[in-house]
Amino acid sequence: MNWIEVIKVSIAKDGRVTMEKQITAIISELKNGEKAQAVRLYRNLLDGDLSIHLCWKGKTAELRGSKTGNCLTHLLKECGLVSHSVWVEKDA
């Protein structure tokens, strides 16, 4: 089963550059040591919000997200408004 966690961070304009650098560093560390299939960072072209995608594969999905996703969500609350959701790939 493939599933992803989407963590969206809305950052105030005045702190965006600093926070983007910090989040990029965190993502870089996750990519090096994480067991997730993929860790991706996206930026919204309109407002600069960030979206972090943790891609997983396993027998089941974590209903409330992985330990990594939950820790990351907790850390990012200092940066701005955070939304964390879990998505399961639907068979066609």
Image: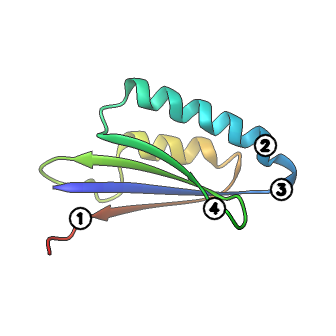
In space, the residues marked 1 and 3 are separated at their CA atoms by 34 Å
Q: Which of marks 4 and 1 is nearer the N terminus?
A: 4
**65, 30: nearer the viewer:** 30
| Residue named by callout 4 | 44
Q: Residue at x 87, y 51 (%)?
A: 14
What type is the residue that disc 4 sits on? Asn
Q: Looking at the picture, how far across and down is residue 10, in whole percent?
A: 68, 59
Indicate the quadrant where residue 37 lies.
top left
What type is the residue that disc 3 sits on? Lys
| Residue named by callout 3 | 13
**As drawn, is 84 to the left or to the right of 18?**
left
**As drawn, is 44 to the left or to the right of 5?**
right
Element type at mark 1: loop
Q: Looking at the picture, how far across and down is residue 34, in whole percent?
A: 36, 30
**24, 88: nearer the viewer:** 24
Q: Earlier in the sequence, mark 1 or mark 2?
A: 2
User: How many other residues sit within 10 Å of disc 1, few (<14), some (14-19) or many (≥20)?
Assistant: few
| Residue named by callout 2 | 17
Element type at mark 3: helix
Q: Do the residues labelled 1 and 3 touch (CB within 8 Å)?
A: no
Q: Looking at the picture, how far across and down is residue 70, in whole percent?
A: 45, 46
Between marks 4 and 1 in the image, the one whose residue lies nearer the viewer = 4
What type is the residue that disc 2 sits on? Val
In space, the residues marked 4 and 2 are separated at their CA atoms by 14 Å
Q: Which of marks 1 and 3 is nearer the N terminus?
A: 3
